[in-house]
Amino acid sequence: MATFLYKLGRFAFRRRHFVALIWVALLTLAGVGAASAPAAGTTSFSIPGVEAQKAFDLLEQRFPGASADGGTGRIVFKAPEGQKMTDAANKATVEKTVKALGDGSEVVSVTDPFTTNAVSKDGTVAYTSVKYDAPGMELKDSTRDALEKAGDDARATGLTVDVGGDALQAGAEPGAIGEVIGLAIAAVVLVITLGSLVAAGLPLLTAIIGVGIGVSTITALAKALDLGDTTSTLALMIGLAVGIDYALFIVSRYRSELAEGRDREEAVGRATGTAGSAVVFAGLTVVIALAGLAVVNVPMLTKMGLAAAGTVVVAVLIALTMIPALLGYAGKKVKATGEKRRPTGEKTGEKTGEKTGENGRPGKQAKPGPGVRWASFVIRRPAAVLLLGVVGLGTIAVPATQLELGLPDDGSQPTSTTQRRAYDLLSEGFGPGFNGPLMIVVDAKNSDDPKAAATTVTDGIKDLKDVATVTPAMFNKAGDTATITVIPGSKPSSTQTEDLVHAIRDQGVDVRADTGAQVLVTGTTAMNIDFSQKLNDALIPYLGLVVGLAFLLLIVVFRSILVPLKAALGFLLSVLAALGAVVAVFQWGWLGGLIGVEETGPIMSMMPIFMVGVVFGLAMDYEVFLVTRMREAYVHGESPSQAIVTGFRHSAKVVAAAAIIMMAVFGGFISSTESMIKMIGFGLAIAVFFDAFVVRMAIVPAVLALLGKKAWWLPKWLDRALPNVDVEGEGLKTQADAASSRDGDEDRELVRA
C-alpha cells in the first residue's frame, strides 16, 4: 500500500499539470450536469414492510384517484377579540379563501369549515383542509406559494391566519451563514496549525473542489435517482469535514518530511505513502459506516448514505492526487513562515527535538510541544487519566437512558414560523390531537359483513383511552374497504398517542379473528411511529455490521487485536455520551436557549443510527491518524512508551486541528432553522469533541501505556494469514536503506579506483 501510494504521489507531483487539469475538468463536468439537470424535489418517503406503508399502498388500490399519500395543507383562522368566525364578514373571508384554494393545479379537494364542523365550540377558531394529489415533499413550489398567498390574503382582512400541514415542507436548509462561519473558523485553525497561508489554503481548496464534484453530481442525478435536498446537505457536511482533514494530514506529513532534509518530490512521495495510507483506511471506515445504512432498508437513508459515501471517496482520491500536484505548484511557500527563513543546513531532529547545524553538532534544545508534554503526563498517570475519562463520558451519557424517539412535526418548529402558530391555534381551538389525526383502514374484503366489521372497529376505538373523536366509516365504491378518522386527545409526538396506535392495532387482532376484516393504522403520525420502530430494530444489526467490518479492517492496519478492540469500545463510549448530550439539550431543554432550541420534544428517530454511522467513521479517522504514527515508531524500534510520545509529537497537533475544523463545519449547521439539521449538527459536533479530545487524546494513550507491548500482540497464525498492507511505510524505509547501501558500495568502489 505505502509503496504504491508513494509512486502515485510522486507521479502526481511530476505530472501536476495533468492531474490538476483532470480534477478541474471533473468539477466543470459535474457543474454543467447540475446546471442542466431537471429540478428535483425532496426524495419521496416510504418505509417498505411497515403497517402504515401497507395501509397507504392498500388505499391506492381500493380508492383509486384519492391520493391516499397526498400532501395536506391547513389554513387556520382566528377571529379578532369579541368576534366569532360565524360572523358574516369573517365567514365571507373564509369562503373566498376556500374558493381560491380550489383553483390550484395539484389540489384534490378543499373543505369548507362551516359544512364539515371545523369550527371550535366557542366559535373563535376555524380551519380549512386542502388535499393534494402529490406527497407533501414533492409538491411544486407554485402550489406552496398559492397556499401561502391564500393565507396572506385572508390575514389582510383582520383575521389571525396561519398555515400548516406537510404541504409546506421544503428542502432542508443547511444554514448558510453558519456554514460560512464554520469554514472561516476552519481557515483560521489551518493558518495557526500550519503557519502558512498557502499551506492552509490547500486543504480548503481541495475540500471545496471535492464537495463541489460530489454535490453537483448528486444534483445532476437527483431527478433520475429520486435524491432530495437532505442528501446534498449530508454530503456537503461530511465531504467538507473529511476533505479538509485528509488534505491536512498529508500536507502536515509533507512538511515533516521536508524538515528531515528530503527534496520536495521525495517528501511528497513519502507523505502520500505514509499519511496517504492512513487516509485510505480512514476513508474506508467512513464509507463502510455510511454505505452500511442500507441495512436499515429505508430507501431515503440508503440514498443519503451512499451519496455521502461517494463524496468521501472523492475526498480520498483528491487528497492522494491533487494535494501532491498542488504541493508541486506551492514550492517553499508551503513551509511555515519561520522555516522559510531558516538556513537550509539547519533542521530539527525528529526524535530528540534538538536543532542541529550543518556540522551535525547539537544546537539549542527545542522546547517539547504540548502534545509531547500531555503524552508524557498520561504515561506517568495512565490509570487516573483512564478512570477520569471513562467516568466523565459515562456521566454525560446518563441522559441517553431516557431517550425518547420520534419525528419532528410542526410543534417542534420555531414559534416565529407560521406552521408552529397554526399548530398552536389548532391545539387551542380543537385540542392537540387535531394536529395528528390517525387514519384507520378496514380491509373487509374477506368479511361476510363489511359494514358490521367497520362498526365493530369504530365502537371498539371509542372505548379506548385518549380518543377525542371518531368519524363514521367511509366505504369505497366496491364496499369492501372503509376508512375511519381518529383524533387523539394528545399531541402527535406524545407517548400517549403512540400507546393509542398500539392499542388500536392490538384490538385489530381480535377484530380480524371475529369478523375476518383486517385493521391497519396509518397517517403521518402512525408512519412516524413505525419509522422509529424500524430504526430501533435495525440499530443492533447495523452496529454489529459496521463495527465488525471496521474491526477486521483495523486488525489489518494495526496488526493487533487489542488496539482495534479498544478503538471500538472508545467509539461506543463517545457516541453514548454524545446521545446523552443531545437528550439533555433537545429533549430536556438544558442550555437549549444557547443554540436556539425553542421547543423540546422527542429526539429525531434516525438520530441514534445516523450518529453511529457517521461518528464511527469519523472516530476511526482520528484513531488511524494518531495510532498509525505510534505503530510506525514502534515498528521502527522504539519502546511502547516512546512510540506513544512520538505519535503525539507528530500527530497530536494535527489531530486536534482536524477535530476543531470538523466541529466548526458541523457546528455551522446548528444555525439552521430546520430542527433536524440543527440536531444533526449539534450531535456530530459534540461527538467529535468527545471522541477526539477525550477518547483518542486521553483514553487511547492511557490504555496503550497500561498494555505496553501487549497492545501490539497478534497471534502468529493470524499474522501469517493477514495481508501486509504496510501502512507504516516499512517498505519505503527498506527501499531507502537499500538505496543508501548501493550508494555506499559505489563510493567504496570509487575510492578503490
Image (cartoon, rainbow, N blue to C red):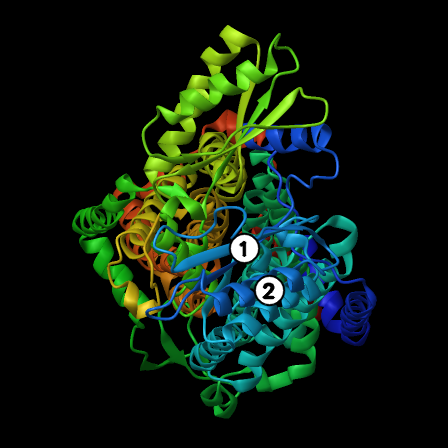
Q: Residue 49 in the image: x percent, y percent?
A: 60, 27
Image vertical order of residue 456 relative to residue 77, above or below: above
- Looking at the image, do the residues carrying marks 2 and 1 touch, with CB atoms under 8 Å apart? yes
Single out the residue that lies furthest toward the bottom. 341
Name the amino acid type tagged 2: Thr
Name the amino acid type tagged 1: Thr
Image vertical order of residue 21 relative to residue 473, above or below: below
* Residue 36 lies in quadrant: bottom right
Q: Residues within 10 Å of mark 2 (few under 14, many from 20)?
A: many
Q: Nearer the viewer, residue 292 or 677?
A: 677
Q: Residue 741 in the image: x percent, y percent?
A: 62, 59
Q: Secondary structure at mark 1?
A: strand
- Is 181 on the left-hand or right-hand side of 49? left
Label 2 and label 1: CA atoms lie apart by 9 Å
Q: What residue sits 81% from the left and 63% below the top?
A: 37
Q: Which mark is residue 128?
A: 1
Q: Name the residue carrying label 2.
A: 97
Single out the residue that lies furthest toward the front. 88
Q: Nearer the viewer, residue 478 or 661?
A: 478
- Is 310 on the left-hand or right-hand side of 622? right
Q: What residue sits 48% from the left and 43% below the top?
A: 558
Q: Residue 746 in the image: x percent, y percent?
A: 70, 65
Q: Residues within 10 Å of mark 1 (few under 14, many from 20)?
A: many
